[in-house]
Image: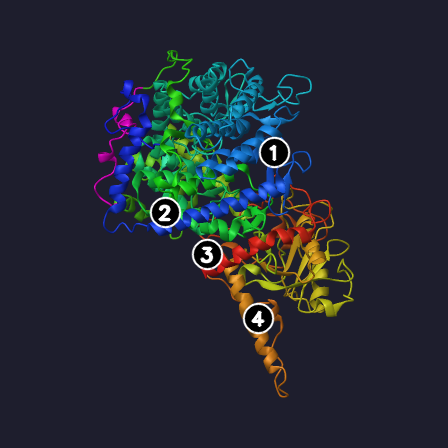
Amino acid sequence: MGLSAAPGCRAGERGPRWRRPWKLLALGLLSASSVLAAAPGAGAMSREEKRRLGNQVLEMFDHAYSNYMEHAYPADELMPLTCRGRVRGQEPSRGDVDDALGKFSLTLIDTLDTLVVLNKTKEFEEAVKKVIKDVNLDNDIVVSVFETNIRVLGGLLGGHSVAIMLKEKGEYMQWYNGELLHMAKELGYKLLPAFNTTSGLPYPRVNLKFGVRHPEARTGTETDTCTACAGTLILEFAALSRFTGTSIFEEYARKALDFIWEKRQRSSNLVGVTINIHTGDWVRKDSGVGAGIDSYYEYLLKAYVLLGDDSFLERFNTHYDAIMRYISQPPLLLDVHIHKPMLNARTWMDSLLAFFPGLQVLKGDIRPAIETHEMLYQVIKKHNFLPEAFTTDFRVHWAQHPLRPEFAESTYFLYKATGDPYYLEVGKTLIENLNKYARVPCGFAAMKDVRTGSHEDRMDSFFLAEMFKYLYLLFADKEDMIFDIEDYIFTTEAHLLPLWLSTTNQTISKKNTSTEYTELDDSNFDWTCPNTQILFPNDPMFAQSIREPLKNVVDKSCPRGISRAEESLGSGPKPPLRARDFMASNPEHLEILKKMGVSLIHLKDGRVQLVQHAVQAASSLDAEDGLRFMQEMIELSSQQQKEQQLPPRAVQIVSHPFFGRVVLTAGPAQFGMDLSKHKAGTRGFVATIKPYNGCSEITNPEAVKEKIALMQRGQCMFAEKARNIQKAGAIGGIVIDDNEGSSSDTAPLFQMAGDGKNTDDITIPMLFLFNKEGNIILDAIREYEAVEVLLSDKAKDRATIFKDLEMENMDQKSSESDAHKPNSEEAPSDSQDAGAVGEEPEGGGESSAVGDPDPLSAASTASASVSMAEEDPHTSGPAEASAPEPACTPGDSQPQEQNTQTEATSKAHWDSKVQPMESILADWNEDIEAFEMMEKDEL
């Protein structure tokens, strides 16, 4: 879609010219882009390289889409690790995440217009026929109004939009008669009961069959919804009204937006994260541009584009001014309190804010878009993916990554706006990381932990709906497209709505006159419809000059945004004291605390306790600084307590046919080899011990020697099991949970503690797998006898695995050729071939961040994490918070809270109930060969 407005256009200067607005913009942007791209020294990517990368995106899409259709359809989503569909009610509940699933073939509907963007018109035609024939929208199931709107209603409307376009071209879809639109209208009516509130804000959930208040609806008791949930409806609902001529949908969506606008905090012009749908009271009063609010802002600006209503632009500009005044602390975007916007609400950011640079491009505010995007890219280069949340000093806060597309979206928009080939290289990095770390034989698997590289058995529909669409468009030239993308606007789910809807069935023309707008500096509107001659200086190094200072922001510094108080003080008084800088022995710091109304109390055990009394502060500003300081101190203390934990480890299956594609999340042990200090990990074939519980002398030592022993949890201490298998000659051990169906998806990881004695005698690595993950290995053994695994602190690059295999084969041939020599000496240690690695402590960030766990400190460690000395996962106790020592440690493996997300999947058995191993291997063979060729090309 077009990214800016026509040169010279200003707010309110729409008039008759608006009939084809974004076509004008596109011309302006393309001319600016071509100037920059052709500039000397710009390092433009060759057309051949762009074509190659575009084709690679197509191959990746085919891999994901074909596996969904083969292994999952008509289920809503694919479970790529177990090669089957996710059907709600047949898998353990994942909580709110499952509200997107409605037994309506979600992934197929969400992917419809992606097929056309990627020039797969035949596949699109087949997919539309399947949707019309197979999908039922009248299911007795409770779904999220927000998710169903953006994914299913948006998917149907996007499919309809491109279907009628193809029909007009005369080659495809000649039989199509608006069937997708009829389905969209049916779904729209099923969502309307959610709006039956006095405020006009919708309930967060609705039953597709029974609505909200029906006795069998099983919903309608909620009182709160997120701002984005209620404010991200206008594009789809208005498009449905414009397509069908039925105005009620647009009316309901407008009423919800009007109510949110009226309830904004008037002094700051910010909105909170959560609102009461009946009273309009803000439930969560923090405000940002990430989760819970993000697409509300997006839809205000895009509603202006699609519908031509100036009130939406005025609202967006009012909010945007507040965002840049309070939330934006370049390159960071930090949540604040809506009533006290100078006060940061938290010290971490979530990954959903990665969409915001793209929205800033749409507005025309390029500089901060470049800054924030570059900061996010540096985080990605550090962790391979953008963690779900990360701190202001760029450490992992939440380690998951469900293959979100927002960063790819912003990359595409920045490239379209600047023409800078740098963003093509960014896209290339995204492609490489997806193939290296997320690709599995049955699709692409979400990352459970970006630090270890472990996978999660999920591939969300938005991955196909958005990620491949933006990546393909990034590398596609205009001649590669079968239609003009500039004729459409993207929804938040990247569905395509035609811009000609702005002049069709205009059922609501009266501007809302009940709202008031804040007087803004006129400069805020200068960038609404920017002149490209101003937006893009005649300097090909413009974007690079903005990025350059941020190149090392993640690795070599602990940056913080400039506080508003600090900004206003300038060269005057010193900025407020930050918790990370505080030292209890510094008299100046103690004086500042006193001024902020904070008292310091020395406890008998040597710790200090901080208490604030706002009335004792020297001024209201000092009291505000004191409150912020206390909140920072609480978060910092909590964070440092969590850092006493060991991070999760990885068990990676490296033998044929897996080749490192399957990575299982494992719990660490407080004894034995510390895998964080052994980069190569421990590699070897697995063997089941006898007795299986490992609580007595091993009776099959010949099978266990130089192998990684598998054993069952229970009946004795973990340390006892480790000693028994070590005595039998094992090079490592994996304890498998005996609790049927347990999974790291649903249970928090824990550490295996020692037995209260000195465990220095245990030198082999020990890891713990829950039942589901353990059964993946056991089932592989049953079907494929020789199974080799790698125990490590994080997953290994597959190229390295192939290289190691070649080295081992060479060593084996060499040893065989020497075997006939009568005087040949025995090899020093066979264990190294099997994967036991000599000590190679890591330097720098990782070792200092993780620390060396003391095997005698099980009691103290138990206060910070869930340890199991005996077979009981509930032996931990809460650690008492205290004022922490300030630190600035930018290491990329800072341990964070263990994964406690609520997602769950069923057991990963490859038995007859799911699919036999022979069938899976047959299905994989062609893909494996192609992947191996790709790996060789990369090497």
Q: Is residue 576 visible?
A: no
The CA distance from mark 4 to mark 1 is 46 Å
Residue 249 x/y as whole percent:
49, 17
Q: Which residue is mark 2?
A: 424
- The rendered magenta stretch, by its main secondary structure, is classed as loop
Residue 511 in percent (x, y) is at 37, 13
State the residue position of label 1: 98
Number of residues whose C-alpha sits closer than 10 Å to that of mark 1, classed few (under 14), some (14–19) or many (20 or more): many
Name the residue nearer the viewer: 197 or 330. Answer: 197
Q: Of the residues under marks 3 and 1, which one precedes in the sequence?
A: 1
Q: Secondary structure at mark 4?
A: helix
Q: Which residues, given as a range, are shown in magenta?
A: 519-541
- Mark 3 lies on residue: 845
Mark 1–mark 2 distance (CA, rounded to whole Å)? 35 Å
- Residue type indicated by callout 3: Gly
Element under label 1?
helix
Of pointers 4 and 1, the one earlier in the residue sequence: 1
**Gap between marks 3 and 2, in whole Å?**
30 Å
Please name the amino acid that badge 2 sits on. Leu
Q: Closer to us: mark 1 or mark 2?
A: 2
Kind of residue sitting beneath label 1: Asp
Inspect the image, locate mark 4, and give the three-letter code of the amino acid beneath it: Asn
Q: Is residue 526 magenta?
A: yes
The residue under label 4 is 809
Magenta run includes residue 841: no
Left/right placement of residue 866 relative to residue 911 reads left
Q: Quadrant of residue 271?
A: top left
Res. 21 visible in picture: yes
